[in-house]
Image (cartoon, rainbow, N blue to C red):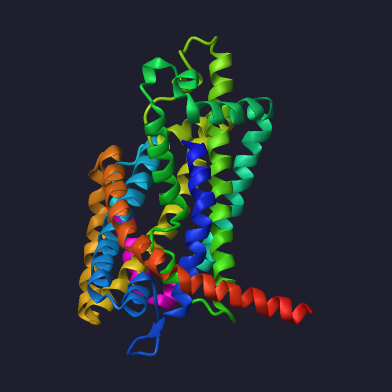
Amino acid sequence: AIFWMWVSSFLGMATIYAEAMLAQKFRSKDKNGQVVGGPAYYIEKGLNCKWLACIFSVLVIIALGFIGNMVQSNSIAAAFNSSLGVPGWVIGIVLAVITGVVIMGGISSIASFTEKVVPIKAVFYLLGTLVILVHNAHYILPAFKSIFVAAFNPTAVLGGGAGIAIQQAMRFGIARGLFSNEAGMGSTPHAHAVAKVERPEQQGYIAMMGVFVVCVIVTLTALAIITSGMSMWEQGGKTQTNFLGVFTGQGIAVTQQAYTYVYGYFGSLFISVSLFFFAFSTIVGWYYYGEMNIRYLFNSQRAVRAYQLVVIAFIFIASFFKVELVWNMADMFNGLMVLPNLVALILLSPIVIKMSKYVGGKVAENKA
């Protein structure tokens, strides 16, 4: 799947560049003077299509605010249950309480939390992952080879018993790529719209860099899993049909087993803590995207408060769900959410092209 995640990320840089530029161009201010924007705004203003903007807003609220945040909560609960044996419902309560404190504090509270947590979590996670790759350095090149071979001939790497076809590898790779970098989904434009930049294309470049950084982190995680699996398989006397046969379970459990192989028990705990910061900051961000669309649809503080309570409830409930169920729900609603946004990007692409050409002309003129 990782190969198709690369492909979706490469192509996604174009869509997220367009999203960021359009979000900047068509952003607005609400009745409180706060800057707002996102696909709903460039669909309504750019295409003069209010009904499609409303459909998109509803899908964002469901896909990210409710279902997407269920995935994050479910993953955190599963991770701590695996590493510390903490019951899922306990983690669900803790997450619901912390989320409530942060999101009810308003946009300033959300911004303050994310700007402090995001850089720290990324640095520690990358350092921990690089240690694993150094430990498994002998298997890095074979891991890359297996990625390319499995993309076009899955049975050669996974074995016939896995039952994985190229179509399935593409489906999971593209779906997970979309879930991780969000390019084309229509979620990140809500954040890009409120950024303070001199020109829209600057935010477009930042958006593209975001996809690249996510792709790097995802790739390092995949290599850590694959190289650990190869090493475990080799040391185990090659009794499994393929090197991924050493892993049991699904979801975050696979990553925890790979890290446990190098770090021992601390590896599983390390992933649990890392995932908490990654997933919780995503919960806060996705909640905010949903809130912006609640305001777009209802322009009411009462509606925002009701949305907050439903989000908190979904975060708690998710701790009882099976991993596969919440991921399938997320894939379905993410796919629905993408459709109106891509329609808008295609129809508004002449504006993006014109703005980009204008920028290029001005840069060339200044250099001359």
Visible residue check, residue 55: yes
Q: Residue at x 49, y 54 (%)?
A: 12
Q: Residue at x 48, y 17 (%)?
A: 242
Count of numbered labels shown in the rendering: 0
Q: Residue at x 43, y 56 (%)?
A: 182
Q: In the rendered image of this protein, does residue 335 appear above or below residue 302?
A: above
Q: Is residue 46 left or right of residue 111?
A: left
Visible residue check, residue 111: no
Q: Main secondary structure of the magenta part?
A: helix
* Position of residue 298 measured from the top left corner of the image (x, y, whole percent): 22, 79
Q: Nearer the viewer, residue 8 or 262?
A: 8
Q: Quadrant of residue 148?
A: top right
* Magenta stretch in the rendered image: 93-112
Q: Is residue 104 in the magenta section?
A: yes
Q: Nearer the viewer, residue 73 or 178?
A: 178
* Position of residue 256 measured from the top left corner of the image (x, y, whole percent): 47, 35
Q: In the rendered image of this protein, does residue 25 appear above or below residue 137?
A: below
Give the residue furthest to the right.
368
The C terminus lies in which quarter of the figure?
bottom right
Q: Nearer the viewer, residue 157 or 221?
A: 157
Q: In the rendered image of this protein, does residue 219 appear above or below residue 150?
A: below
Q: Quadrant of residue 93?
A: bottom left
Q: Nearer the viewer, residue 160 or 143?
A: 160
Q: Residue at x 70, y 77 (%)?
A: 363
Q: Is residue 344 in the magenta section?
A: no
* Position of residue 220 measured from the top left corner of the image (x, y, whole percent): 58, 41
